[in-house]
Image (spheres, rainbow, N blue to C red):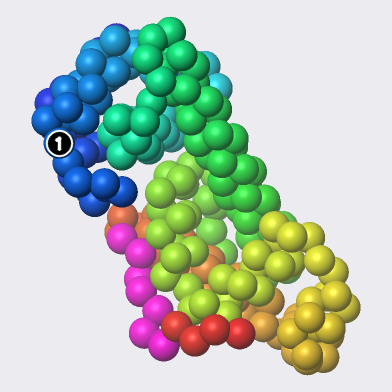
Amino acid sequence: MKDPGGTAYIESVTDEPAGDSSTPRRDERFAALYETHFEAIYAYVRRRAEPSDVTDILQEVFAAAWRSANRIPDAPEDRIWLYGVARRVVQRSRWKVLRRRQLLHRLETEPVTTGVQGDFSDLLPSRLDDAFAHLRARDRELLRLIIWDELDRTEVARLLGCSVNAVDIRFYRATGRLRSRLVTAQATGRVRPDPSPATEL
């Protein structure tokens, strides 16, 4: 299978600033790498990543290849270099998927105190990411500490310099706001932005 976007896909990969000035040699080098190794890297990623994440992972791998084209070793080490980049990007993607699942599990199992409920089992990963990104910074940080870093309420309270009760209140308000955004995303396909300023904890 060839890449889903064709020329447009290559343009989307290269349409970003690079660490050094663009040269014909680098463009030619990248084109050769892409043409020679795309199928192998695509197969590698497809076997290891969620289907919805394959295109994003490929774009990140080949964006790295374009930025570093002049420094990538010659064949056969060039393919090993690309596999190394793909491996790291896939690992980050897996961690992102795990965090999504942890977040959805908590949203679906935590007691609801906001009156906002929803079944998010068929939610697109991008909708969850968008909804999370639209939260205030202090809400995002609190959810990360409790859900992803798995700190208990007492540890979070000590870290933030507040009471355990304050942590509980903030957590349930944050999950309520996130549930609300996910319900909006499920109903309309769009995430309702948070009008509040994004202040840090």
Judge left or right: residue 183 versus residue 120: left
* Residue 55 seen in the current view: no
Position of 109 relative to 111 (above/below): above
Give the labeled residue for mark 1.
Answer: 23
The residue at the point 23 percent across, 16 percent down is 32
Element at label 1: loop
Q: Quadrant of residue 183?
A: bottom left
Q: Is residue 193 magenta?
A: yes
Position of 36 relative to 90 (above/below): above
Three-letter code, disc 1: Thr
Residue 127: x and y in percent read 41, 53
Residue in front for this viewpoint, 60 or 102? 60
Judge left or right: residue 136 versus residue 127: right
Q: Quadrant of residue 111?
A: bottom right
Quarter of the image that includes the N terminus: top left
* Residue 121 seen in the current view: yes
* Region rendered in magenta: 190-197
Residue 136: x and y in percent read 49, 79
Residue in front for this viewpoint, 48 or 103? 48
